[in-house]
Amino acid sequence: MMGRSPEERLPPETKTISSKGTFGMTGAIELHHKRMLQLCLARAEDSPDPSTKLGALIGKPGGTILGTGCNAFPPGFDPTPARLTDRQAKLDFIVHAEMAAILDCARLGFSTNGTILYFAARDAYGHVWGGTPCVRCCAELITAGVRHIISPPSHFMPDRWFESTEKGRMMLFEAGVTCEIVEL
Ligand SMILES: [Zn+2]
């Protein structure tokens, strides 16, 4: 992460929303987005992953929440300590929070077309990060019809995700999905 400014990691169309509400965003809308991201962090606490807990929610532009998710094994698949300390097992078995939120909507019968995805992560040290979802989640979010993504800055995102999120950012940009960074 060192040597890259946060701005270099944002899609070209992304606006950085400061806590003072720059770019004309009204205080009420900005506060709403912050609350939604706080809800993501609360949902993230359900994740059994000891290293990174990521929460996501899908909402309508008007604010209605349709579905939520966190990074976790599928329901009924036991998150044993052996599995949670095995990186390959986690890669194989964990459903990412963003996909879990899409599937929550599917299970509940809500369309994800034209929706907003919020997501936020917290690492084992308590650092909160966001930025762009991984490339697989971006492909899935685009296909689900999500049109806008809101997250905190990516400053504390682990370096191992950088390449994947850069590819995801490229996909989102080409597909016309917009991103917005909101500082918590
Ligand atoms: Zn992902």
Image: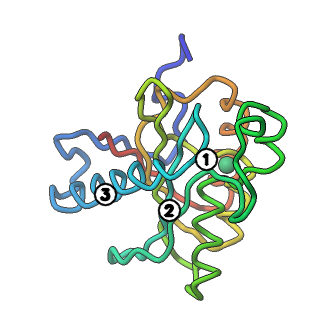
Distance (Cα) linking label 3 and label 2: 11 Å
Which mark, residue 133? 1
**Callout 1: CB less than 8 Å from ligand 1:** yes
Q: For mark 3, does the 10 Å Cα neighbourhood hold few (<14), some (14 to 19), or many (20 or more) residues?
A: many
- The answer to whether residue 13 is left or right of residue 181 is right
Judging from the image, what secondary structure is the residue with disc 2 in?
A: strand
Distance (Cα) linking label 3 and label 1: 17 Å
Q: Mark 3 or mark 1: which comes first in sequence?
A: 3
Q: On the image, numbered disc 2 is attached to which residue?
A: 117
Q: Quadrant of residue 16?
A: top left
Place of residue 151 in the rendered image (x, y in percent of width and height, measured from the top left): 44, 48
Which mark, residue 90? none
Judging from the image, what secondary structure is the residue with disc 3 in?
A: helix
Kind of residue sitting beneath label 1: Pro
Q: Quadrant of residue 80?
A: top right
Place of residue 167 in the rendered image (x, y in percent of width and height, measured from the top left): 73, 41
Place of residue 157 in the rendered image (x, y in percent of width and height, measured from the top left): 54, 30
Near-viewer residue (109 or 24): 109
Q: On the image, numbered disc 3 is attached to which residue?
A: 33
Kind of residue sitting beneath label 3: His
**Quadrant containing the C terminus in the rendered view:** top left
Contact flag, marks 2 and 1 (Cβ < 8 Å)? yes
